[in-house]
Image: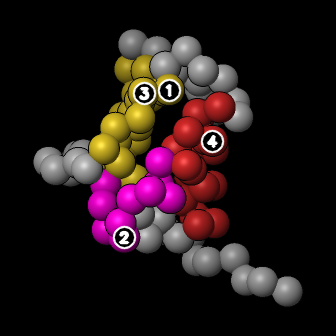
Amino acid sequence: MSEIPDAAPAPGPNPPETIDGTVDASGLVCPEPLMLVRNRVREMARGQVLHVVATDPSTRRDFTDFCRFMGHGLLAERQGDGRFEFWIRKG
């Protein structure tokens, strides 16, 4: 039986100043934003930061769970004007 990693700390309020890539999943609905992010993160090196923009409210849950289960860091998240932004550091 595999273990579930310990819960990561809650994302901070301030996004990192440096990012290594962006995924714009605006207008897409579950599971498309998660699939795009998953594929993009696979291409990145450990420690790099991905900025994600989405409009589907379910992405808040999806990306939190994705980071927790895959060992990535959800560094920050922000929401406003129907947009959700996330900064994910590849673990």
Residue 58, given in percent of the width and then of the height, sits at 64, 32
Q: Is residue 59 left or right of residue 47?
A: right
Range of magenta residues: 40-49
Among the 4 quarters of the image, the one containing residue 29: top right
| Image height of 74 relative to 58, above or below | below
Q: Are marks 1 and 3 in contact (CB under 8 Å)?
A: yes
Q: CA distance from mark 2 to mark 1?
A: 22 Å
Q: CA distance from mark 2 to mark 4?
A: 19 Å
Identify the disc placed on residue 46.
Answer: 2
Q: Is residue 31 left or right of residue 11?
A: right
| Image height of 55 relative to 18, above or below | above
On the image, numbered disc 3 is attached to which residue? 24
Q: Secondary structure at mark 2?
A: loop
The answer to if 41 sits in the magenta stretch is yes
Q: What amino acid does circle 4 point to?
A: Met
Q: What amino acid does circle 2 point to?
A: Arg
**Residue ranking furthest to the bottom:** 1
What residue is at 60 percent from the left and 21 percent from the top? Answer: 28
Identify the disc placed on residue 25.
Answer: 1
The answer to if 19 sits in the magenta stretch is no
Among the 4 quarters of the image, the one containing residue 80: top left
On the image, numbered disc 4 is attached to which residue? 35
Q: CA distance from mark 1 to mark 4?
A: 10 Å
Crowding near pointer 1: few (<14 within 10 Å), some, many (20+)? many
**Residue ranking furthest to the right:** 1
Q: Are marks 3 and 4 in contact (CB under 8 Å)?
A: no
Q: Are marks 2 and 1 in contact (CB under 8 Å)?
A: no
**Residue ranking furthest to the front:** 43
Residue 63, given in percent of the width and then of the height, sits at 56, 47
Q: Nearer the viewer, residue 51 or 84?
A: 51
Among the 4 quarters of the image, the one containing residue 47: bottom left
